[in-house]
Image: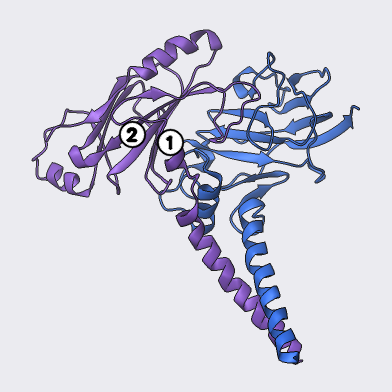
Chain colours: A blue, B purple
Amino acid sequence: MRFLLHLLAMVAVALAVGFGLSYYALTDGRVLGALRVGPWAAWPGVGLPAPDPYTKAYLSRTGILQLGQAEGLAFTATTDSAGTPLERNCRYRIEGTTPVATFWTLQAQAPDGASVTRPDGLRELESRQVARANDGSLIAYVSPSLAPDNWLEIAGQGPFQLILTLYDPSNLSGNSVSVDTLPSITREGCGT
Amino acid sequence: MRTLLWVVAGVLLGGIIHIVVILSVPAVATHNIWARMAPLAPLNKVVLLPPLKPGEANPLQLDPALSYAVCRLNLKTGPGVLTGTLPDAFWSLAIYNPSGAVSYSITNRDGIGKNLNLGIFNADQTKLLAQQEIEVDDGLLIVESNSDDIFVVIRLMAPYDVVRPRYEKALSAVACGNIKQ
């Protein structure tokens, strides 16, 4: 009887660890394959000819059209800098410097990738069309309500994610990825 | 004490399950990029991916700022070649193999400017090329592919929406096909 209990416990632990760890690795992947900078996460190996097993599994599972190593890298944020999930009825300030790149875009998407910006408003923020501070840093607002500086208007309710795509980032050339500064995301309040 | 041993055994077994799961995901996934692109990309023809509409699901995670052109090639019938002149804006090109990995990528800043003239050769054709048994144009950028089945994606960034139709016309005019051997 005791043996059977032990065996059941072992199988339960094995299944929980095996599948739990796999699910975690392919969604969040904080410690396993993803590169984390503040609230932003990216899979630095997605554009390599022979990605590591975790990156390969992530690509197969999501089926996204990833950028090649020379083309750039996309960072995703699902939470603000404090770790609270992003909500479409809240106002967020995106502030800081971006790594050197030919250009970048900032998209706001629902979890299925659909854009959550107002249909006839800006599609996304683009580095060539944003206003910057004197030191070259960026202040942008992602918000359903009117905001100063660069405003990406979003609409609707529910969670969303921000995608910051760096195209042709000069400091990502080669296989060593070194991005140490990405903008912070600060929640400034929520509507009803 | 004995219970602890069983738990440790469970964790070890869990580790093995984890490794098996991670390694088998690519084989069992049905929505990988190759399966998604196959209906969108006809053989030897450059097609533009339809523009994203607001609120529409975006499973490929495309960027609405860019225009995308895709062409599928099979190198069994000869080396692949893409030629065309693209606008003086940022563009990049990536070659995807059936496993969904990017085997080669380049941007217009890598010294090729506006002219796209790319030859994609498999290992055997590269050997023939070295023995000068395949005739190619001067200035053809040679890329070796580890797979015969590939698709090529060109991304083009129109700086303003007004020029986008003209840029997309240039993009769809890119020729994509095989060099006859």
Residue in front for this viewpoint, A161 or B85: A161
Q: Quadrant of residue A129?
A: top right
Q: Is residue B95 visible?
A: yes
Q: Amino acid at mark 1?
A: Met
Classify residue B117 as left or right of residue A70.
left
Q: Position of residue A172 (x, y in %)?
A: 52, 42
Q: Position of residue A116 (x, y in %)?
A: 70, 26
Element type at mark 1: helix
Q: Position of residue B3 (x, y in %)?
A: 75, 87
Q: Which mark is residue B72?
A: 2
Most extreme residue toward the front, as rendered? A1
- Are the residues under badges 2 and 1 in a single subunit? yes
Q: Quadrant of residue A80?
A: top right
Seen at 67% across and 55% down, the residue is A30
- The CA span between labels 2 and 1 is 9 Å
Seen at 84% across and 34% down, the residue is A187
For the N terminus of chain B, give its image quadrant.
bottom right
User: Which chain is disc 2 placed on?
Assistant: B
Q: Which mark is residue B37?
A: 1
Q: Amino acid at mark 2?
A: Arg
Q: Is residue A69 visible?
A: no
User: Which chain is disc 1 placed on?
Assistant: B
For the C terminus of chain B, give its image quadrant.
top left
Classify residue A49 as left or right of residue B63.
left
Q: Are marks 2 and 1 in contact (CB under 8 Å)?
A: yes
Residue in front for this viewpoint, A179 or A78: A78
Q: Position of residue A131 (x, y in %)?
A: 70, 18
Element type at mark 2: strand
Q: Which mark is residue A170?
A: none
